[in-house]
Image (tube, helix red, strand yellow):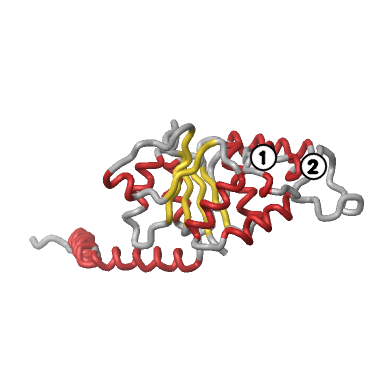
């Protein structure tokens, strides 16, 4: 399963793309601020990162330059409005692709497939099946949250496992609307679970750092003991 991290400032667009990619089988983690990326990376190592080019809380170019210094950097695409931004030099080399906002289903899937080095045809075919949309008729389907396309979200109403089997992931209700509102107001990443390997590595690093200070700590401990001992030694007359 390919891992994709979304650092997209527009909540609706971020959720729309996340939903689309999850339905295609990708493992997706979304955050709405670039300052949250470091914490998110502790338990999630993306192969692809899609970020807003320039926003109030996300600077895609700075984020790309920082991530490209990692030992295994992800492929990076920037999401922009209007014509593609003019970027040159080292900044441009840190970016692998551009996506235009508002996102269109076909172009987004083609770009992700290219970055993941996967054949695009099976992904487009799968998307058409799960959304009941024929992309061969044109690239007009927008990915904008619950507005991405009517086929992806049913009319409001409580989910009934008997009357509407298999629709739990797409049915809307007053409760799911309240949950979406909560997510909008609290855009901290939900997936904060650290993997066992990362936790073990962090523990090893802490032990290594503690060993480097062991001599100093032993010296301080010795001085404390000598001080306490001297307090109880009677003075010679």
- Left or right: where does residue 58 sit relative to residue 185? left
Viewer-proximal residue, 190 or 156?
156
In the structure shown, which secondary structural element does the residue marked by tag 2 occupy? loop
Q: Can residue 164 be seen by looking at this rendering?
A: yes
In the structure shown, which secondary structural element does the residue marked by tag 1 occupy? loop
**Dots 1, 2 in contact, CB < 8 A:** no
Residue drawn at 20 percent across, 67 percent down = 215
- Judging by the rendered image, the residue that carries numbered circle 1 is 148
- Judging by the rendered image, the residue that carries numbered circle 2 is 154
- Judged from this view, the residue extending furthest toward the right is 163
| Among numbered discs 1 and 2, the one appearing first in the sequence | 1
Label 2 CA crowd tier, 10 Å (few <14, some 14–19, many 20+): some
Viewer-proximal residue, 15 or 179?
15
- Left or right: where does residue 63 sit relative to residue 233? right
Which x, y percent locates residue 205?
A: 34, 65
Q: Quick one: quadrant of the N terminus?
A: bottom right
Q: Is residue 26 above or below residue 137?
A: below
- Left or right: where does residue 113 sit relative to residue 61? right
Q: Can residue 43 be seen by looking at this rendering?
A: no
Which x, y percent locates residue 225?
A: 23, 64
Q: Is residue 35 above or below residue 215?
A: above
Q: Quick one: quadrant of the C terminus?
A: bottom left
Which x, y percent locates residue 36?
A: 45, 44
**Foreground disc of the pair 1, 2:** 1
Which x, y percent locates residue 164?
A: 87, 50
């Amino acid at each position: 399963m390919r891992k994709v991290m979304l650092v997209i400032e527009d909540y609706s667009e971020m959720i729309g793309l996340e939903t689309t990619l999850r339905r295609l089988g990708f493992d997706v983690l979304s955050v709405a601020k670039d300052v949250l990326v470091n914490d998110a990376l502790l338990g999630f190592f993306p192969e692809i990162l899609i970020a807003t080019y320039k926003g109030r809380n996300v600077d895609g170019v700075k984020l790309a330059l920082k991530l490209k210094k990692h030992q295994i950097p992800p492929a990076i695409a920037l999401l922009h409005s209007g014509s593609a931004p003019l970027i040159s030099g080292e900044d441009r080399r840190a970016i692998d692709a551009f996506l235009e906002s508002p996102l269109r289903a076909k172009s987004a899937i083609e770009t992700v497939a290219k970055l993941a080095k996967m054949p695009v045809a099976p992904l487009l075919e799968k998307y058409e099946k799960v959304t009941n949309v024929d992309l061969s008729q044109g690239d007009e389907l927008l990915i904008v949250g619950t507005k991405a396309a009517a086929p992806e979200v049913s009319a409001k109403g409580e989910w009934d496992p008997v009357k509407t089997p298999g629709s739990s992931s797409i049915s809307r209700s007053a409760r799911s609307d309240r949950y979406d509102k909560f997510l909008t107001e609290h855009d901290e990443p939900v997936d904060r679970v650290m993997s066992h390997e990362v936790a073990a590595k962090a523990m090893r690093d802490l032990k290594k750092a503690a060993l480097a200070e062991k001599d100093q700590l032993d010296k301080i401990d010795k001085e404390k003991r000598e001080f306490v001992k001297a307090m109880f030694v009677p003075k010679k007359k």
